Amino acid sequence: MSVVTRFAPSPTGFLHIGGARTALFNWLYARHHGGQFVLRIEDTDRARHSQSAVDAITDGLRWLGLDWDGEATSQFARRDAHVAAAERLLASGDAYPCYCSQDELAKMREEARAAGRPMRYDGRCRDRDPSTVPAGVPPVTRLKAPQSGETVIDDAVQGRVVVRNDQLDDMVLLRADRTPTYMLAVVVDDIDMGITHVIRGDDHLTNAFRQTQLFRALGAPPPVFAHVPLIHGPDGAKLSKRHGALGVEAYRDMGYLPETLRNYLLRLGWAHGDDEIISTDQAVAWFDLDGVGKAPARLDPAKLDNLNGHYMRAADDVALVEAIVPQLNSALGRTLGLADIDRLTRGMDGLKQRAKTLSELSDNAQFYVSSLPLTMDPKAQSLLTDEALSTLSRLAARFSTLPEWSIAALEDAARAVAEDLGLKLGKVAQPLRAALTGATVSPGIFEVAAVLGRDETLGRLADAGVAIDDALTGTLD
């Protein structure tokens, strides 16, 4: 059997984190088994349908690197097939027209509420005498579900799950206006698209019993169901907006890498031994449903940050520069030039060691491409005392005569100045950092100076108040 999985979101908003994990699990299962992963937009609810939501979903999937096979399918565009399936069930006697009014249904609900039981349609139209059908009232179409026995699902995650058929009622397949319901559309689409495995959140488990009955009524074997526990917030409560950003695009905008989010979502509810860092190739090779746990997974922002730091350190320097250039252009109010890009690329190895997100990386990198005068933070400014500026003047004199502008040569020059003045290296390095970066934290300051180059380094020292002219004159005396 060739595996076919599907991701079938409703286009009513962004691609939330739970939906992204569902898509990932379906994608991985299909790729692991050499099958197909298809995308179906379940847009039958036209009142809530939004093209911008469709775009957000597809953009989110593309950003995550989850490519689907073939064209995305619109469920609404297949409504004629859904109606035709209901008509076949009417013809075979597996469905029936129901003429119950809204008042009758409301009375059923009131009686169920009074009796403390869930509302279930009582089947009064199953064998209704045609002579009692009210004139001019369009009926809904209901499934004639089995009333005795059990419906059993051998779920690939939850195990064997059973419900008594007398706990289920005759669900509506077509509304009075002949539009198909979600339950009918899902089953017909799964049959026609050859879906073999339905991997989704366990909030759909109750739907699976009714859908199983409908698959059988339509003469098709149900797919393998795999209902995955939902994601909870750090506090253990069901994930909601109060837990923070829920959309994939929010994580992207906060500066997380797609490979990070794939790895993180994979480990939310699935495990492969003690492995935490799992590449996409490894995930495709290892993923199967027996690794999915039965307990809800919890979001852990700290773990996400640490994981993103790992992937950023492993990322290509040029790719990281390309990723942060738009943020830097916006922050600086100008378009970075080739010299800026070159400087960022040469400095990226040191920058990416200390950042957890692209946003943090962009902030940390800004000093490399900032125009003079640098904006000094208060702590950095406090380091540039008269004594420190005098020390930096002597350092500038040594820097100006270095035959080789390298990290090692720059550090040796700073050590020599410190020894001459009887200072620890930090008393030279810290004010140097303040003068060159405007901050007290940065990559190694001699690496920074090497990346900036001789002219820029001396220019920044002069801008910070170092008497460069006197220092250079002193080297000639």
Image: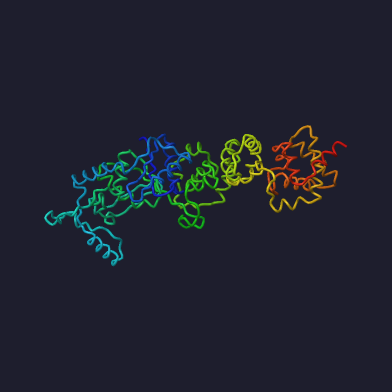
Q: Is residue 144 visible to us here?
A: no
Judge left or right: residue 263 versus residue 193: right
Residue 2 place in picture, x, y as percent: 36, 35
- Give the residue displayed 23% in from the left and 62% down from the top: 103
Judged left or right of residue 299, residue 434 is: right
What residue appears at the point 21 percent right and 47 percent down from the top-left corner? 94
Q: Position of residue 379 (x, y in %)?
A: 71, 53
Measured from the top left, where is residue 274 in percent x and y? 54, 45
From this viewpoint, which residue is outermost toward the right?
A: 477
The quarter of the rendered structure image containing the N terminus is: top left
Which of the pair 376/6 is nearer the observer?
376
431 and 180: which is toward the camera: 431
Residue 350 in view of the camera: yes
Q: Quadrant of the C terminus?
A: top right
At 77% from the left edge and 36% from the top edge, which residue is drawn? 409
Is the residue 196 above or below the residue 47 in the image?
A: above
Instruction: Describe the colour scheme in one phrase.
Output: rainbow
Q: Tell me if 406 is positioned left or right of 191 in this view.
A: right
Q: In the figure, residue 437 lies in which quadrant?
A: top right
Q: Quadrant of residue 288?
A: top left
Q: Residue furthest top?
A: 403
Between residue 339 and residue 111, name the one nearer to us: 339
- The front one of 176 and 338 is 338
How many marks the image carries: the answer is 0
Q: Is residue 170 above or below residue 358?
A: below
Q: Quadrant of residue 395?
A: top right
In the figure, is residue 250 to the left or right of 70?
right
Where 129 sits versus 283, above or below? below
Indicate the position of residue 60 as horizontal and vertical percent values. Answer: 46, 43
